[in-house]
Structure formats: C-alpha cells, structure tokens
Amino acid sequence: MSSGDADGLRDLGRLLTTKRYGRAHEHHDVIGSTNDRAMQWAREGAPDGALVTAAAQTGGRGRHGRPWSSPAGGDIYASVVVRPADPPADLGALGLAVAVGLREGLPDVPGLALKWPNDVLVHGRKLAGILCETRWLGRRPEIVVGFGINVSRTEFPAELVDTATSLHLVLGAAAAPRPAPLLADVLASLEGVLDEFLPVGFAAVRARYEPHLTMLGRRIRLSRSGSEAEVIAEGLEDDGTLRVRPAAGGDSYTVSSADVWLGPGAGE
Ligand code: BTN
C-alpha cells in the first residue's frame, strides 16, 4: 500500500480478476469528480475498462446535477470508461444493468434491494448510487459509468442522515469489507454483467434486476421535470422503463427517467 493510500486503491491491480475493467487505472488522493476525469481520459483515448478512483472528491456529482457527498475515509468513488462496439437500442437501461453489477458484487447484506432506476438500498436507505454519462461519436457511444459506494462511513451530513447508510453501519466494523477488495469484486461483477447487457440490451439482465425491485405493486411518488405524481409501480417494460398507474385512477403510462420516493415498505 502506498503512503497516504489508506484504502489500498493504488494497489488495486494485484486484486483484479477482470479482463479489462481496472487494468488501466488512475488513482487520485483528491479530485473534483472521477466521472469528469474519466470522460477527459476517454477523450484522450482511454481504453475500454479504464478506471479512475479517488479517495475523496471535491465536486462529486449525482443524478439530476445533485452533489454526491465524497469525503475521504474509506468509501468508493469510481468511474469506468465503457466503449461498446455495437450498443443496444435500449442503451438507456445501462444504469439498470450497472445496478445489477453492483448488487451482485457486494457482500451478502440483509435488506439489500434496488430502487428504479439504479439506486442500491439497504432497508430503504441508500448504499450506492450510479451516474452514467455518454458522449456520442457518430453512432458509437463513449460512456463513463460512475458509482459511489458507502463502505466505511459512519456519519453523514445532516441532509443524508435519514436516507443513507454504509456497509460499516449495516454489517458492523468487523464484517464490512475493505474498499480495495470490494472494488475488485464489484469490477469483476460489473464487467460480467455489462458484457452480457451491451450486445443484447436489458432483456439479457432483466431476470437479475426485477426480483430485487421491491417497489413493484406499491404506491410511489414520482418527480419529473418539476411535477410530482402519486402512482402505483406496475412493472417494467422490455427496455427497462417503468410502467405506472395514477394512484387516483387513470391510464397507465411509462417513464424513462424520474426521481422516485418509496412509500412505507416499498424499499424493504
Ligand atoms: C446518484 O445516486 O445520484 C449517483 C451518484 C454517483 C456518484 C459517483 S461517485 C463516483 C462518480 N463521480 C461522480 O462525480 N459521481 C459518481
């Protein structure tokens, strides 16, 4: 382990079992956003699977432009460059496939579930978040798959105290994994899942996503483009979009992007 690298991420290479993911790797003690650096590296020609990690981010970003709390102290902030040769028509479901990769790469955690489209929860609290960003070069996408996993944190900023958790908090200090071996497991899982998803689309991973989506059949609140709606989550379409029905009655419709709040029990 390098000095100043308490998480062991600089030496990730010796733990990797992947073919491509993480084989080219940059680690930063502090960076603005690993997603931004990975996109810049992609523009400079980074290979498929190139990985950027950081011990801390000063400008970590979440979905819908929200900040992602990213202090130093044993959590994972990682971004992978993904270059599909022939992307599927439903590439928009990529985040759902990434959620499968994260879930399957994590240790067994009681209460682990997925929230559409791509949050990983434990008993309704957020354990990990995913931010996929795409730049199109003609018909070929250059993608950055970014994810943050709360591994070692025991304290959160006031605005997250009621909604976030970490592996340390749910498993206890002794059973919580160290960041580097955990990231090696997650990368192996992610590479396997995306190698199945990218040539085919959501159909290839649906059976590994849907059973963990606890909100189906339940009442949820949707927020899209500034408007909110109380709906029942009915199911998934073949391309991973969510089919919902207004709770007050009316026709079903599908949503491809939204913020979702779960009612009682829907995140269990
Ligand atoms: C979300 O749930 O809103 C997505 C959070 C994604 C956070 C990760 S941390 C590593 C990578 N770099 C970023 O700036 N964001 C992603």
Image: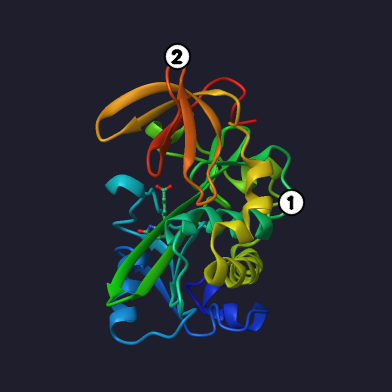
Determine the residue positioned at 55% across, 78% down: 21
Q: Is residue 63 visible in this depiction of the protein?
A: yes
Left or right of 151, for residue 137: left
Residue shown at 47%/24% (left/top)? Answer: 245
> What's under tag 2, amino acid-wise?
Gly
Which amino acid lies under the numbered mark 1 shown in the image of this protein?
Ala
Quadrant (top left, top right, bottom left, bottom right) of the C terminus: top right
Residue drawn where x is 62% and y is 66% of the image: 193
Q: Residue at x 57, y 51 (%)?
A: 152
Q: Give the quadrant of the N terminus.
A: bottom right
SS class, disc 1: loop
**Rendering quarter of residue 141:** bottom left
Q: Residue furthest front?
A: 251
Residue matched to label 1: 174
Residue 227 drawn at (x, y percent): 27, 27
- Mark 2 is surrounded, within 10 Å at the Cα level, by few (under 14), some (14 to 19) or many (20 or more) other residues, namely few
Disc 2 marks which residue?
249
